[in-house]
C-alpha cells in the first residue's frame, strides 16, 4: 500500500508573514512569490498557470481576494494545518483500502493565492494533493470533521486521475467533465467513510445540502441550460461564486448523478468513462422531466 509524504510549508509562511504583514499589499504579494515560494518553484508556477489558463491576473486576484484577509485568518489556518498533519496519513491509508488503489503521494500544506482548498494534481512528477490554507480558512473548513471530508474528496480525485493514467485515458476540462470529476470525488468521499459525508455542509453553509435537495430539478435544469448556452459553469463550482446564495452546488449535482450511475457500475468503471457527458446528461434530463411532471400534476 502506498504512503503519503507530508510537506508542511506553514512554518515558512509564518516566517515570511511576520516580516511582510506591515508592508504595502503589493510588497506582500511580491515577497510571497520571491521569498516564501522560492523553495517550491513548481508550486508557484502551477498557481500562476492556473490563473493564466483562466485569463486572469493572479496578482489582481491576490490583491482583491486573498492578502487583505490573511492576518484575520491566521488562527483558522493554524488550526487547519494541525488537523491536516494529524489526519492526512490515516485517511490516506483508509482511502486506499476503501476504494481500491495503491500509490505514493505528496500532501502539500501551503498558503496560496486562492487556487482552492484542495487540489489533486501532479507535483514533481508525483501524484499530489495541495491543501491551500487560505481557502480552507475562508470556507470555514478548519475543523477535523470538515477536513476529514476535504481530505477524502481530494484523495478520491487522486485515485480517479491515477486510474485514468494507468489505462491511458485523458483528463478533460469541459463542463460535463467538471460535473463528472467532482461527482466522482464526492461519491468517493462517501465511500471512504461509508456515509454520505459532505464537507460542504461545514462552515457557513449549514443548510447547503437540504437546499440543494429541495432544488435538485431546478439546479439540473439551470446546469443544462448553462451548458447549452455555451456559458461557463464556474458559478456551480467556484467558491467565490454562488447560485441563490449557495456556492459549489455543482458538487451536489455531480454526487447525485454518480450515485445514480453507481447502481449499474463500480466506481472504477465510472472513473474510466470515455465521454461522461453521454451518461450524465440523460440523468439530469430525467430529473428535469420528473420535476415538470410533478408540477403538472399539482
Image (cartoon, grey):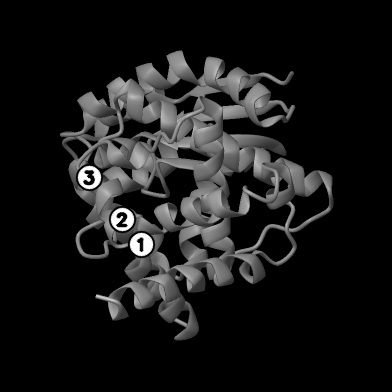
Q: Nearer the viewer, residue 143 or 115?
A: 143
Mark 2, mark 3: which one is toward the viewer? 2
Check disc 3 and report its element: helix, strand or loop.
loop
Is there a contact, CB below 8 Å, between mark 2 and mark 1?
A: yes
In this rendering, position of residue 75 left or right of residue 52: left
- In the image, which disc is placed on residue 235? none
In this rendering, position of residue 267 left or right of residue 247: right
Q: How far is disc 1 from disc 3 in space, using C-alphas?
A: 17 Å
> Which residue is disc 1 drawn over?
216
Q: Badge 1, how many Cα within 10 Å: few under 14, some, many 20+?
A: many
- The correct choice, above or below, for 279 with respect to 183 in the image is below
- The correct choice, above or below, for 297 with respect to 170 in the image is below
Q: Nearer the viewer, residue 105 or 66?
A: 105
Is there a contact, CB below 8 Å, between mark 2 and mark 3?
A: no
Residue drawn 35% across the image and 57% down it: 249
Residue drawn 40% across the image and 41% down it: 117
* Percent x, y of residue 230: 48, 83
> Which residue is disc 3 drawn over?
205
Question: Is any atom of residue 11 visible in this view?
Answer: no
Residue drawn 58% across the image and 38% down it: 156
Mark 1, mark 3: which one is toward the viewer? 1
Q: Badge 2, how many Cα within 10 Å: few under 14, some, many 20+?
A: some
The answer to which quarter of the image holds residue 131 is top left
Q: Tell me which numbered mark, 1 or 3, is placed earlier along the sequence.
A: 3
- The correct choice, above or below, for 174 with respect to 30 in the image is below
Q: How far is disc 2 from disc 1 in space, using C-alphas?
A: 6 Å
> Which residue is disc 2 drawn over?
212
* Percent x, y of residue 57: 39, 65
- The correct choice, above or below, for 23 with respect to 174 in the image is above
Amino acid at each position: 500500500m502506498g504512503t503519503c509524504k507530508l510537506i508542511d510549508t506553514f512554518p515558512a509562511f509564518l516566517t515570511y508573514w511576520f516580516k511582510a504583514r506591515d508592508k504595502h499589499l503589493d510588497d506582500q504579494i511580491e515577497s510571497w512569490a520571491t521569498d516564501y515560494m522560492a523553495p517550491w518553484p513548481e508550486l508557484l508556477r502551477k498557481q500562476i498557470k492556473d490563473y493564466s489558463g483562466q485569463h486572469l491576473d493572479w496578482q489582481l486576484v491576490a490583491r482583491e481576494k486573498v492578502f487583505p484577509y490573511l492576518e484575520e485568518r491566521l488562527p483558522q489556518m493554524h488550526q487547519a494545518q494541525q488537523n491536516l498533519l494529524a489526519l492526512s496519513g490515516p485517511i490516506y491509508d483508509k482511502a486506499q483500502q476503501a476504494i481500491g488503489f495503491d500509490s505514493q503521494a505528496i500532501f502539500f500544506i501551503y498558503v496560496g493565492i486562492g487556487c482552492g482548498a484542495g487540489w489533486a494534481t501532479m507535483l514533481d512528477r508525483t501524484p499530489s494533493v495541495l491543501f491551500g490554507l487560505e481557502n480552507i480558512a475562508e470556507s470555514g473548513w478548519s475543523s477535523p470533521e470538515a477536513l476529514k471530508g476535504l481530505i477524502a474528496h481530494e484523495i478520491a480525485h487522486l485515485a480517479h486521475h491515477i486510474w485514468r493514467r494507468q489505462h491511458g485515458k485523458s483528463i478533460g476540462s469541459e463542463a460535463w467533465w467538471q460535473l463528472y470529476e467532482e461527482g466522482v470525488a464526492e461519491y468517493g468521499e462517501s465511500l471512504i467513510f461509508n456515509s454520505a459525508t459532505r464537507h460542504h455542509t461545514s462552515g457557513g453553509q449549514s443548510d447547503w445540502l437540504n437546499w440543494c435537495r429541495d432544488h435538485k430539478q431546478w439546479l439540473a435544469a439551470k446546469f443544462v441550460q448553462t451548458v447549452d448556452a455555451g456559458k461557463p459553469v464556474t458559478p456551480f463550482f467556484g467558491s467565490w461564486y454562488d447560485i441563490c446564495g449557495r456556492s459549489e452546488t455543482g458538487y451536489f449535482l455531480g454526487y447525485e448523478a454518480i450515485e445514480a450511475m453507481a447502481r449499474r457500475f463500480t466506481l472504477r468503471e465510472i472513473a474510466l468513462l470515455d465521454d461522461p457527458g453521454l451518461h450524465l446528461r440523460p440523468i439530469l434530463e430525467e430529473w428535469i422531466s420528473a420535476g415538470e411532471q410533478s408540477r403538472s400534476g399539482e
